[in-house]
């Protein structure tokens, strides 16, 4: 496994490798990231993992400066997964002096996290586009844990006709249902326990849906009853929207998703479940 810190090294290491699978991350890797990496390794000639805590996707007061940085452990996990190249650029490599160009994906960026994290998806789309242009992958892998991010990237790739395939990988969970997240390490034991309310709310909505309920208010009422049991979890949003456009819907007719975001103490967690028959 090679480690590239500059775009020039990256290009050199990727010369003649065939199809390139790409997994962009902010590091602090866990089994969710490992799952993306293993899928990429299986499907491509070489896999590139990027580790870059992207400043432009954090808002003021968010956790940019305290985001966990565990580069040694990330490299060990990457090597075990079969990664060919770890791309770990400095901020100036991604955003050279005077950088002034940003990508705004409208509509799908607006609801859910977009409402509460202004500029977040602009930062995500910009850095992913920049990384795509440096890595030039054949396939890029994104976790459905960050469903809205996946939809934003998918839209950007279609709109800009970027020649690559975007793969969505199902959410990897702990045995009790909590979605793996680099931010889970911020949780105290008590918060970790309360965090189970998120998966319980997803399960309540899913089982009502599986039982034939299609009315969005009725489905959300199931989640509301679950949240009421754990007042420590401060819900930011809990909404059902259509896929892939994230439109507002009164009933679930085609594909839709139920997404939740909220706080346990200072830690913001998100999760979602796709509703399809
Ligand atoms: P991150 O660096 O954690 O923001 O995410 C890097 C990539 O890993 C994104 O495509 C995430 O959606 C994906 N990812 C993070 N957690 C999980 C998970 N629990 N299951 C599947 N993919 C995940």
Image (cartoon, grey):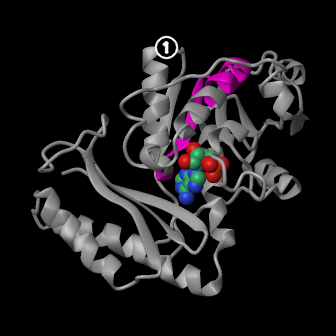
Residue 32 in the image: x percent, y percent? 60, 56
Q: In the rendered image of this protein, does residue 134 appear above or below residue 47?
A: above
| Mark 1 residue element | loop
The quarter of the image holding the N terminus is top right
Is 28 situated left or right of 103 in this image? right
Q: In the rendered image of this protein, does residue 204 appear above or below residue 273?
A: below
Is 158 situated left or right of 2 in this image? left
For image coordinates 63% across by 40% down, the residue present is 57
Residue 30 in the image: x percent, y percent? 68, 60
Q: Please tell me whether residue 132 belongs to the stretch shown in magenta.
A: yes
**Quick one: 161 or 20, which is closer to the camera?**
161
For image coordinates 64% across by 75% down, the residue present is 187
The mark total stands at 1
Q: Is residue 210 visible?
A: no
**Quick one: 34 or 29, which is closer to the camera?**
29
Q: In the rendered image of this protein, does residue 76 appear above or below residue 199?
A: above
Q: Which residues are magenta?
A: 128-145
Which residue matches tag 1? 160
């Amino acid at each position: 496994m090679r480690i590239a810190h500059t775009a020039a090294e990256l290009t050199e290491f990727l010369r003649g490798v065939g199809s390139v699978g790409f997994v962009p991350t902010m590091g602090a890797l866990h089994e969710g990231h490992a799952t993306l990496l293993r899928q990429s390794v299986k499907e491509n000639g070489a896999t590139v993992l990027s580790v870059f805590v992207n400043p432009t996707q954090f808002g003021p007061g968010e956790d940019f400066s305290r985001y966990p940085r565990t580069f040694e452990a990330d490299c060990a996990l990457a090597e075990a997964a079969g990664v060919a190249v770890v791309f770990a650029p400095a901020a100036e490599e991604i955003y050279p002096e005077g950088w002034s160009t940003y990508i705004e994906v409208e509509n799908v960026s607006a609801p859910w996290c977009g409402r509460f994290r202004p500029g977040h998806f602009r930062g995500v789309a910009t850095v992913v586009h920049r990384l795509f242009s440096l890595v030039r992958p054949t396939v890029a892998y994104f976790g459905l844990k960050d469903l809205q991010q996946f939809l934003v990237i998918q839209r950007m790739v279609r709109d800009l006709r970027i020649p690559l395939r975007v793969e969505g990988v199902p959410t990897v969970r702990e045995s009790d249902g909590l979605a793996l997240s680099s931010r889970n390490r911020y949780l105290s034991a008590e918060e970790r326990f309360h965090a189970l309310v998120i998966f319980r709310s997803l399960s309540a909505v899913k089982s009502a849906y599986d039982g034939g309920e299609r009315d969005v208010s009725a489905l959300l009422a199931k989640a509301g009853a679950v949240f009421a049991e754990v007042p420590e979890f401060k819900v930011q949003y809990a909404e059902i929207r259509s896929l892939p456009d994230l439109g507002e819907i009164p009933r679930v007719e085609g594909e839709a998703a139920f997404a939740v975001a909220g706080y346990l103490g200072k830690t913001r967690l998100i999760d979602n479940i796709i509703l399809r028959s």
